[in-house]
């Protein structure tokens, strides 16, 4: 007999998979060439709904205008739909939310289970619609005729939902010198990556309301995100500066570093060819991708609060402290266990995905014959898991089996951390006994 507590866990997954299949069917019939295979349509639908952006065919020329509307709807549903489904599930079954279920059904959106569903959904729709519409208008005006009205709307939604999908053949390379367009895109990406908790708190603060419990988590999210953007910008700027002969070149290098520091953590837009970056730059991008955005946001990754908690845990271990302290408050053991589970699960999935793709794509060839492929596979797997969508050009080379592996990684990356914790705490039997403890030599 299925437990009642499975329902909030299963509903978002069923809805997610059903939407992917529906999107694949629609994309198959709106292909610009009419020759899009079923596996490619399924891959593109998965990538759009998971707001990843990896593509086996061109996003701009591979589909008709109707297909672009389908992709736009998938991006919007992917960025906000799972959160909405989770919240609806919580209130439909009216469960008492445990620490684990809170993560599973979307309470992490607000860090508070006392909000009213109707007011929550209204604020969600209004805030998101306003941000995306304002972004579209600004892109259309600042773009000086480069964006059509639809393209402006598409890129605004793609940026806010952190999809990184562009209708231009070179992504955003043509705008690398356009500070206005790049600034609007960055603001949209940051807004989508901060999470609805931050946006809703800002809205309520303007209305004169305040929640101390939520304010603490919001402060952690903002401070950690700021440090990541600043640190990523500084690191990319230092390793990519080729010439500092003029102030204009220095500014261009700095602005490019800032843009990719913002985009790599969440969206995947790029203004330079990723495959032309240095290895050190790729390593920096990999770390930013792995961290991702905030809980309850459109971004992927293990989330900024998870990484902040993980580093706080390591610091406590090095200093010999019993408590893990962040900003003057100690984390509970349940939260610490979730943090360690998320980080360990993410690393394990990335390792398994890399091994699987190496087997399917390597074709038993020697390292001399596939030189550099390991880096491409590793980058592809992390990009898929963190739903960033940056690629070194490996996506188009994937075999059918490889596409299925990447699709699975994208889905798990989008809903996996929530799914894993819920599954672990619902599938396991209740253990009503303890076994003797021993010390095991480690290290």
Image: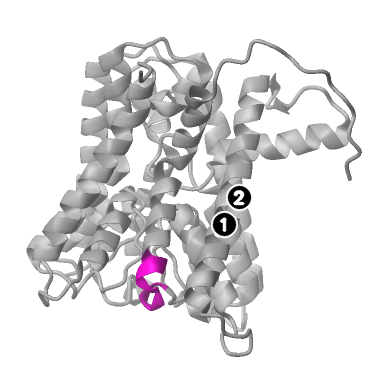
For the point 71% across and 22% down, which residue is it? Answer: 328
Residue 93 sits in quarter: top left
- For disc 2, the marked residue is 348
- The residue nearer to you, when weighing 1 against 83, is 1
SS type, badge 1: helix
Q: Is residue 50 visible?
A: yes
Neighbourhood count class around disc 1 (C-alpha, 10 Å): few under 14, some 14–19, many 20 upward: some
Disc 2 + disc 1, Cβ < 8 Å: yes
Looking at the picture, how far across and down is residue 110, in whole percent? Answer: 41, 24
For the point 14% across and 76% down, which residue is it? Answer: 35
Looking at the picture, how far across and down is residue 311, in whole percent? Answer: 71, 40
Neighbourhood count class around disc 2 (C-alpha, 10 Å): few under 14, some 14–19, many 20 upward: few
The label shown at residue 218 is: none
Q: Is 170 displayed left or right of 235 in the figure?
A: left
In the depicted structure, whether residue 311 falls above or below residue 117 = below
- For disc 1, the marked residue is 352
Color encoding of the figure: one colour
Marks 2 and 1, how far apart in space? Answer: 6 Å
Q: Is 129 displayed left or right of 416 in the figure?
A: left
For the point 83% across and 34% down, which residue is it? Answer: 317
Magenta span: chief secondary structure: helix
The boundaries of the magenta stretch are 395-403
Q: Is 181 displayed left or right of 154 in the figure?
A: right
Residue 232 sits in quarter: bottom right
In reply to whether residue 246 is colored magenta, the answer given is no
- The residue nearer to you, when weighing 112 against 402, is 402
């Amino acid at each position: 007999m299925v437990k009642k507590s499975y329902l909030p866990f299963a509903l978002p997954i069923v809805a997610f998979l059903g939407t992917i299949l529906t999107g694949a069917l629609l994309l198959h019939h709106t292909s610009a060439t009419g020759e899009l295979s079923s596996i490619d349509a399924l891959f593109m639908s998965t990538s759009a709904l998971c707001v990843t952006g990896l593509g086996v065919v061109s996003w701009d020329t591979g589909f008709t205008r109707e297909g672009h509307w389908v992709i736009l709807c998938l991006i919007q549903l992917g960025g906000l739909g799972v959160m909405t489904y989770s919240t609806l599930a919580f209130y439909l079954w009216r469960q008492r939310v445990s620490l684990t279920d809170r993560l599973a059904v979307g309470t992490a959106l607000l860090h508070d289970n006392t909000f009213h569903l109707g007011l929550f959904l209204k604020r969600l729709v209004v805030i998101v619609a306003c941000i995306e519409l304002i972004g579209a208008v600004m892109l259309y005006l600042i773009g000086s005729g480069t964006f059509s009205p639809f393209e402006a709307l598409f890129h605004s939604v793609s940026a806010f939902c952190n999809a990184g999908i562009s209708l231009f053949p070179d992504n955003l390379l043509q705008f690398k010198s356009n500070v206005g367009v790049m600034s609007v895109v960055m603001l949209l990406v940051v807004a989508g990556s901060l999470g609805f908790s931050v946006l809703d708190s800002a809205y309520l603060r303007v209305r004169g309301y305040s929640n101390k419990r939520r304010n603490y988590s919001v402060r952690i999210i903002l401070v950690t995100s700021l440090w990541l953007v600043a640190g990523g910008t500084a690191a990319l700027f230092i390793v990519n500066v080729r010439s500092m002969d003029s102030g204009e070149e220095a500014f261009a290098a700095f602005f490019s570093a800032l843009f990719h520091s913002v985009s790599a953590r969440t969206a995947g837009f790029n203004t330079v060819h990723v495959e032309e970056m240095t290895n050190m730059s790729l390593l920096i991008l990999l770390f930013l991708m792995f961290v991702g955005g905030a809980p309850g946001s459109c971004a992927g990754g293990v989330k900024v609060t998870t990484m902040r908690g993980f580093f706080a845990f390591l610091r406590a271990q090095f200093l010999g402290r019993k408590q893990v302290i962040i900003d003057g408050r100690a984390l509970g053991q349940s939260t610490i266990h979730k943090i360690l589970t998320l980080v360990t699960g993410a690393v394990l999935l990335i390792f398994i995905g890399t091994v699987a793709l190496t087997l399917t794509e390597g074709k038993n060839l020697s390292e001399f014959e596939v030189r550099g492929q390991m880096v491409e596979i590793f980058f592809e797997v992390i990009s898929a898991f963190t739903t960033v969508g940056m690629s070194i050009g490996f996506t188009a080379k994937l075999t059918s089996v490889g596409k299925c592996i990447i699709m699975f990684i994208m889905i798990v990356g989008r809903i996996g951390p929530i799914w894993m914790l819920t599954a672990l705490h619902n599938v396991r039997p209740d253990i009503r006994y303890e076994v003797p403890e021993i010390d095991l030599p480690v290290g």
